[in-house]
Amino acid sequence: MDHINLKARAKINITLDVTGVRDDGYHELKMIMQTVELYDGVYIKKIEKPIIKLKSNLEWLPKDERNLAYRAAALIREKYGIKEGVYIELRKAIPVAAGLAGGSSDCASVLYGMNKLFDLGISRKTLAEIGLTLGSDVPYCLMRGTALAEGRGEILTRLPSCPKAWVVLAKPPMGLSTAAVYKAIDRAKEIYHPNTEAVIEAIKDKDLHKMARNLLNVLETVSMEMCPMVGEIKRRFMETGAIGSLMSGSGPTVYGLFESRKIAQSSAETIKEEFGLRDVALTKIYNV
């Protein structure tokens, strides 16, 4: 094998709770993560020259150590003494800096792909440990599916498959700094925490409506203050037929859950036109 093609899928948060601040400065999290079908294409090929060459369909995307996919390849080459180089091509479809773990998913795919391509025999557990040194979402992106994530996001418990639904993703043009969002939540006087157990119960019962009623992300309140469009898009999703809507991660992407593809498509078109958005995607729940 001299090359491999992979699909680095996006994730959404069904819930996101902040339960404290750890001694290492990271926030203690408890959240339910879910993979969706939207993906970046990741192509990895062995090359003789001992370098990492990264190419993307987005010209402005960093192609050096600032890119998690590049860093993943560099780490595996160094750690396992690989003499050959690799050419990596990212065909980005997941919006960047959007709360959808696009960079982490690309990183996870490169870790997985390097393991396969060079027949390294790295266990899933070790791969996740390596991934955590690169980013908190990387272990989940290696696992995929429906999972409860705790700690920094690295303590993962697989859950039963999420009920099927259509998902519309809408990213406002304004970016949100993850660090700024978490600093704001530390100062917030009133925080609404999700009922994580009720959501897990709804997932086990395959009760999409109960799950949708209990969508909650503690970061939304402060994110809405920084980017009012987050709240406006949520409201329009519900007005255009969504059974639930939530901001994913630290934002700014908001998603709507739909039972009908037709209604989801109509909602996507409405939101894209009304808010003048470039990044709107119709996808669906992806279960491994």
Image (cartoon, rainbow, N blue to C red):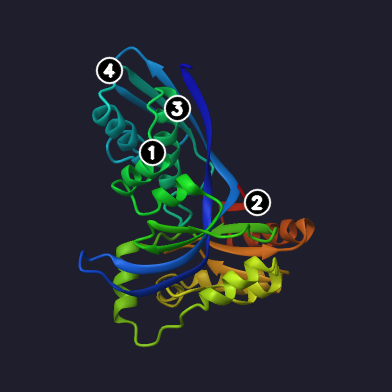
Indicate which disc, 3 or 4, sits on the residue closer to the N terminus. 4
Q: Which callout, 2 or 1, points to the residue nearer the camera?
A: 2
Residue type highlighted by circle 2:
Thr
Where residue 171 sits in the image (x, y, percent)? 52, 58
Q: Is residue 87 above or below residue 102?
A: above
Q: Secondary structure at mark 4?
A: loop
Q: CA distance from mark 4 to mark 2?
A: 40 Å
Q: Which residue is mark 2?
A: 283
Q: CA distance from mark 2 to mark 1?
A: 25 Å
**Local crowd at mark 4 within 10 Å, few (<14), some, or many (≥20)?**
few
Indicate which disc, 3 or 1, sits on the residue closer to the N terminus. 1
Q: CA distance from mark 3 to mark 4?
A: 16 Å
Q: Which residue is mark 4?
A: 83
Indicate which disc, 2 or 1, sits on the residue closer to the N terminus. 1
**CB under 8 Å between callouts 3 and 2?**
no
Q: Could you say which is closer to the camera, residue 179 or residue 201?
A: 201
**Local crowd at mark 2 within 10 Å, few (<14), some, or many (≥20)?**
some
From this viewpoint, is residue 161 visible? yes
Q: Which residue is mark 1?
A: 60
Rendering quarter of residue 215: bottom right
Where residue 193 sits in the image (x, y, percent)? 46, 80
Q: Which callout, 3 or 4, points to the residue nearer the camera?
A: 3
Residue type highlighted by circle 3:
Lys
Determine the residue positioned at 33% across, 31% down. 73
Q: Which callout, 3 or 1, points to the residue nearer the camera?
A: 3
Determine the residue positioned at 41% across, 23% down. 119
Indicate which disc, 4 or 1, sits on the residue closer to the N terminus. 1
Lateral position of residue 8 relative to residue 243, left or right: left
